[in-house]
């Protein structure tokens, strides 16, 4: 039996298909909940929002680690090509959809539950904008590396990896404590 390499095009197509199916199922369940309008719709939307945020944060934490390993791989090597593929798949299949769902559901919750009022909510949205900027920064690096740009030093990505962590902690404190 010949094992299929995960870097082969057919493995990529299968992974993309699984991701599309998973996303479609997630969105289908979300749509079914929204259309059925259960009494606890707010809690359902909040649960889906948290699930999307967890997926987005996982990607924001993991992608800089891939950049660190990529920076150690010799340019043009099979290892560097594997990292390129991993980075692109993580960004396209997990991070981008999770960010879009997080934003959509978060804005819905901000409007439905709070009518966009509350200093804590405004501060949270500002921090989520910064988190989105970190996402965009990582996205640019994925595109740069895919075009065979020289990777930034591992030390840079170790420091950049702390930004989503700090933002996440501040956002969680604002959401749970609502200090103002």
Image: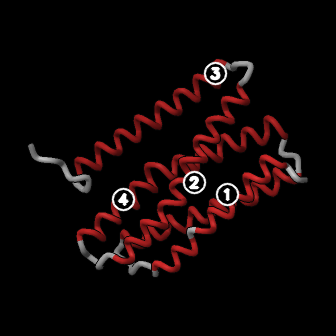
Q: How many residues crowd around disc 2 within 10 Å: few (fewer than 14), some, or many (20 or more)?
A: some
Measured in 3D between alpha carbons, the distance from the residue under mark 1 to the one under mark 4, in whole angstroms, is 24 Å
Query: Nearest the camera: 119 or 61?
Result: 61
Instruction: First in sequence, mark 2 or 4: give its number.
Output: 2
Measured in 3D between alpha carbons, the distance from the residue under mark 3 to the one under mark 1, in whole angstroms, is 31 Å
Instruction: First in sequence, mark 3 or 1: give its number.
Output: 3
Instruction: First in sequence, mark 1 or 4: give its number.
Output: 4
Residue picked out by circle 1: 168
Residue picked out by circle 4: 86
Q: Nearer the viewer, mark 1 or mark 4?
A: 1
Instruction: Tell me what residue is drawn at x 77 percent, y 42 percent.
Output: 110
Instruction: First in sequence, mark 1 or 2: give its number.
Output: 2
Residue picked out by circle 3: 35
Give the quadrant of residue 123.
bottom right
Q: Nearer the viewer, mark 3 or mark 4?
A: 4
Instruction: First in sequence, mark 2 or 3: give its number.
Output: 3
Report helix, strand or loop for mark 2.
helix
Left or right: residue 169 compared with residue 4: right
Give the quadrant of residue 162.
bottom right
Instruction: Tell me what residue is drawn at x 10 percent, y 46 percent.
Output: 2
Residue picked out by circle 2: 57
Measured in 3D between alpha carbons, the distance from the residue under mark 2 to the one under mark 4, in whole angstroms, is 17 Å
Measured in 3D between alpha carbons, the distance from the residue under mark 2 to the one under mark 3, in whole angstroms, is 28 Å
Q: Do labels 1 and 2 touch, CB within 8 Å?
A: yes
Query: Nearest the camera: 135 or 79?
Result: 79
Q: Nearer the viewer, mark 2 or mark 3?
A: 2
Give the quadrant of residue 51.
top right
């Amino acid at each position: 039996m010949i094992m299929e390499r995960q870097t082969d095009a057919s493995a990529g197509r299968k992974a993309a298909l699984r991701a599309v199916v998973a996303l479609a199922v997630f969105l289908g369940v979300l749509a079914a909940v929204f259309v059925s309008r259960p009494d606890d719709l707010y809690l359902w939307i909040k649960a889906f929002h948290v699930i999307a945020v967890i997926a987005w944060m996982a990607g924001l934490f993991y992608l800089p680690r891939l950049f660190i390993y990529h920076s150690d791989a010799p340019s043009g090597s099979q290892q560097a090509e594997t990292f390129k593929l991993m980075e692109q798949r993580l960004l396209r299949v997990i991070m981008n959809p999770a960010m879009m769902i997080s934003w959509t559901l978060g804005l819905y919750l901000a409007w439905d539950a709070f009518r966009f009022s509350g200093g804590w909510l405004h501060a949270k949205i500002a921090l989520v904008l910064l988190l989105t900027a970190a996402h965009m920064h990582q996205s640019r690096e994925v595109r740069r590396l895919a075009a065979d740009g020289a990777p930034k030093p591992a030390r840079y990505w170790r420091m950049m990896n702390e930004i989503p962590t700090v933002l996440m902690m501040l956002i969680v404190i604002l959401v749970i404590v609502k200090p103002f």
